[in-house]
Image (cartoon, coloured by chain):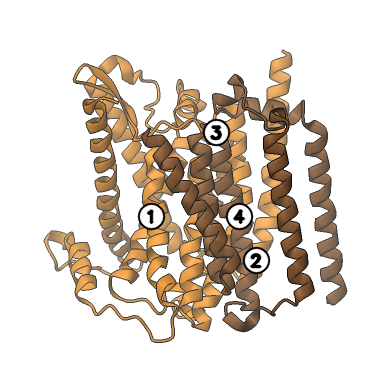
Chain colours: A brown, B orange
Amino acid sequence: MSLSLLFYCVAAITIGSAVFVVLNRNAVYSAIALVLCFFSLAVIYLLLEAYVIAVLEIFIYAGAIMVLFLFVIMLLNLGKEDALPNLNYLQRATSLLLVLLFFVGIFIVMIGDQGLLHQPTEQFLAGGIYPLGEALFSKYLLPFEIASLLLLVALIGTVYLAKRKV
Amino acid sequence: MDLLGFTIILVKVLVVFAATMLGVLVMIYAERRVSAFMQDRVGPNRVGPKGVLQPIADGIKFLMKEDLVPEKVDKPIFILAPAILLIPALMTFAVIPFGSSINLFGREIALQVADVNVGVLYILALTSISVYGIVLAGWSSNNKYSLLGGLRSSAQLISYELAMGLAVVSIILLAGSLRLNDIITDQQGSFFSWNIFRQPLAFLIFLIAVYAETNRLPFDLSEAEQELVGGYHTEYSSMKFAMFFMAEYANMITAAALTVTLFFGGWDVPLLDEGSLGLFGTLLSVLSFLLKMAFFLFLFIWVRWTFPRFRYDQLMRLGWKVMLPLALFNIFLTAGYLTLKALG
């Protein structure tokens, strides 16, 4: 019972910080709010007894990726409030449409085929790292390898762009 | 959970917290005395016998100083930053076992606050969080030196965390678990079953990365007082400044404890079965853990007054071009060995 209360508190923090990320015009504050969002997501994973995912969420997203984000924001000195350009109406309409589409998609999935929402199996509920590793290197090997290829492509692209400027 | 179990956990939390804080005080004293010894000086010797009360005098001085917040700083973040640095530093010790188990009130109590099955990952995750304190302190100070210190620190973290994580992976491969207790059990037995003898390369990489993670010389580029005044903490005064230092020493204590746990058998006393000796065995295991930790804390100070600071490009080159490939090579070797062993 107290756990569900905890869930609602954490969920409120997650959504609140996510809204803050979007609405705030100071890029550094947005980045910090995003870190807070990742932390509360990690707590939600903990409540689902997915310990490995929770720790990885903090380790990789909050600990590594957001540090890089912050690094770039500070280097470009985007902290000033007027640094962000005002979007024109076409851009606003497009983004609104895309957000609506996204939520409609989630809604359809939720009321439609419940099987699309993967329920954790008994094996996963143990929260250990073995089932995760086993699934990653057997059942989901192809997506895993494709994801690594995608990262490699991004890496090569970055090096190419950086080389051309020098 | 029953009341007794809850009380036991509360006591353990308090003990670990108090011990860490006491360790910080001891380290402040030790740092000043040992550095004085290495530079052929006397060091603080006026407050109390041999100057042992000097850290307390320092603490009172910090409290009495004016807590200055400069005019053009980003106030909320400026005030928050020292806390962001200190809290993860104090949280990390929760998963480190500091002794074998003890029998009290008819139940077996493990000398560890939380036995998490992803213990190693928990520590790596929290240490990667603490960099936010430094980065945000540097940014919010609205000062070029501070900003440079913060930027250096975030770039440094990214370069060294990978090598450190990969060095730990080879230990995890050997133990077959992320739980710190399993890693200690894996190292029990003879003297040579400690991981430093089984994984010397991983130990070297881990040790170097630890110095970069804790921002200690030769990798203290984010402070670098000769070029950046004080780096990220230039604008801080009073207790906020003290919090940065408490965090640095708390991080060192955790790093030493982690090194001992991963590579030196944790609380293990070689060639001895602690469980058979009852309470005496437990005391012996705690003592062995503390002694090993003390050596690594001393090493931190020793290294500080022995090596000059790395230049920034040297640090990056060492991290990406030397330590990362070596760590990957080490994983390859370990995995190959384990595969061959499994094949028979």
Q: Residues within 10 Å of mark 1 (few under 14, many from 20)?
A: some
Residue that numbered label 2 is attached to: B314
State the residue at coordinates (69%, 25%).
Answer: A134
Chain label for disc 3: A
Q: CA distance from mark 4 to mark 2?
A: 22 Å
Instruction: Residue type at mark 3: give it.
Output: Ala
User: Which quadrant of the view contains residue B44?
Assistant: bottom left
Q: Please, is residue B258 above or below residue B241 in the view?
A: above
The quarter of the picture where the N terminus of chain A appears is top left
Q: Residue A161: x, y in percent?
A: 85, 68
Tag 3: Cα neighbours inside 10 Å, few (<14), some, or many (≥20)? Answer: many
Circles 1 and 4, Cβ within 8 Å, touching? The answer is no
- Compared across the picture, whether B92 is left or right of A164 comes to left
Pick the front one: B219 or B230? B230
What's the amino acid at mark 2?
Answer: Gln
Residue B78 appears in view: yes
What amino acid type is highlighted by mark number 4? Ala
| Helix, strand or loop for disc 4 | helix
| Mark 1 vs mark 4, CA separation in Å | 18 Å
Classed neighbour count for the residue bearing mark 4: other residues with Cα under 10 Å, few (<14), some (14–19), many (≥20): many
Do the residues marked 4 and 3 share a common chain? Answer: yes
Of badges 3 and 2, the one in the foreground is 3
Task: Residue A36 in the image: state x and y as whole percent.
Answer: 50, 56
Q: Which image quarter is the C terminus of chain A in?
A: bottom right
Residue where numbered disc 4 is placed:
A64
Q: How many marks?
A: 4
**Circle 1 is placed at which residue position?**
B87
Q: Residue at x 68, y 29 (%)?
A: A114
Give the quadrant of residue B67: bottom left
Label 3 sits on residue: A50
Question: Quick one: which residue is furthest to the bottom in this view?
Answer: B71
